[in-house]
Image (spheres, rainbow, N blue to C red):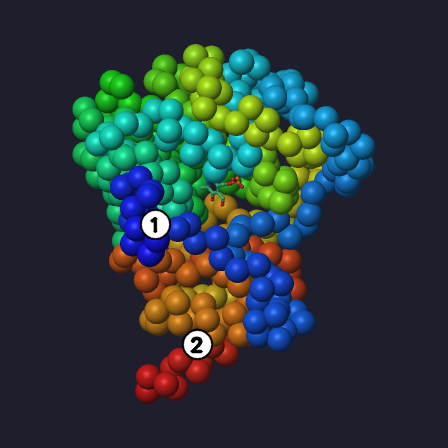
Amino acid sequence: MNANDLNLLARAEVRDLASYNAGLGSDAVRKRFGLTRVAKLGSNENPMGPAPAVTAAMAHACSEIALYPDAGCQALRAALSKKLNVPEDHLVFGNGSEDLLSVISRVFLDHDDEVVTVVPSFGLHFIYPMAAGARVVGVPMTAEGTFDVAAMVAALTPRTRLLMFSCPSNPVGCTLSADELQQLLSALPAQCLLVFDEAYYEYARWEADYPDCLGLIQASGKPFVLLRTFSKAYSLAGLRVGYGIVSDPLLADLINRLRTPFNVNRVAQAAAVAALADDEHLQACLSHVASERRRLAVALQEQGISTAPSMANFLYFSTPYPAEVINQLLLREGVIIKPWREAGYANHLRVSIGSCEDNDLFLQALARVLAVQETRTD
Ligand SMILES: Cc1ncc(COP(=O)(O)O)c(C=O)c1O
């Protein structure tokens, strides 16, 4: 069979789908460019690593890996229920929150349904609904890098089955005000599920301007799934644990029908319980990100680059040059960041807040790369 015939074996929706841009790992960059030191700032990971108790919890779970994990994530469910003051049957778990995005798309979307999201966006907010046959309407953010709430409201129609976006936004870092969230909640059509992706919640929650989104959404009485993850502030990205808070246990039941039964592995469940218990470590991670984010924004400004205000563990910015060009030059310098590939944002890049040393490496490499570009275009 030739490539064309093989392609035809796939469902029509999958044939034209773009792959998610997962970026390169440190080892691949080290090998490709013969480097010893690499700053990995492309995936919004936590440079401080997980809470100390996570290692012991994982070691204990490892002694039991011959056994399937708890399909209901009971220990983690109980711990989260207590922490969030949410009933246990209002929680769903995924192999990362991206797993839940996939399951949600398959459970709630049919051919030709509409999904409203924002642009620039987290890639999977497009990819999974499109794979389910839905039409995704991407509402551009404002030129200032804020949610265009009026345009989002205008995009909602009786055919909209999901309103799905991240807040804080990935990649911009902006958030909704309480008033803006209320406007969206009031405008949700009947038969529309709000999928509120709060992957960066922990970073934003201590900021004075960040509303209690969960509280506001719960109070609205609208159907929702609010997604969070242990990959970012809790530093368990390599283990893959995410969760959703739902408005009604029936939504949890529907989601559970299509997830793989043992989707969160034994080690990941144990690690998440241990991570959740250590507030002190979490606070240390959040403080590091807040102060380094400020330092990085100022240092970039000194290089003539303004960043969108961010409440998350990354900064979004543009340069006068194509992001792919800057990205390739930075990779040679041992710096991995994320070039944006959505149409209209081809000069934009997102850099994660890393360790102080990695952030310095990025700043120095970017200054060199931009200086070279300037001499080329002069
Ligand atoms: C907005 C958003 N949602 C979901 C995810 C997926 O997170 P995970 O699958 O690691 O829980 C990410 C990861 O970068 C993200 O940025």
Is 324 rendered above or below residue 76? below
Q: Which mark is residue 6?
A: 1
Name the residue that disc number 2 marks: 370
Q: How crowded is the residue under tag 2: few (<14 C-alpha within 10 Å), some, or many (20+)? A: some
Q: Which quadrant of the figure contains the C terminus?
A: bottom left
Marks 2 and 1, Cα distance to the nearest angstrom?
Answer: 43 Å
Callout 1 amino acid = Leu
Answer whether residue 201 is visible to the viewer in this image: no
Disc 1, SS: helix
Q: In the image, 136: left or right of 60?
A: left
Is 230 rendered above or below residue 77? below
Q: Which mark is residue 283?
A: none
Q: Residue at x 61, y 49 (%)?
A: 46
Out of 106 and 343, give the one closest to the viewer: 106
Q: Residue at x 74, y 32 (%)?
A: 65
Callout 2 amino acid = Leu
Q: Could you tell which of marks 2 and 1 lies nearer the N-terminus?
A: 1
Q: Residue at x 81, y 32 (%)?
A: 63
Q: Residue at x 40, y 54 (%)?
A: 308
Answer whether residue 101 is visible to the viewer in this image: yes
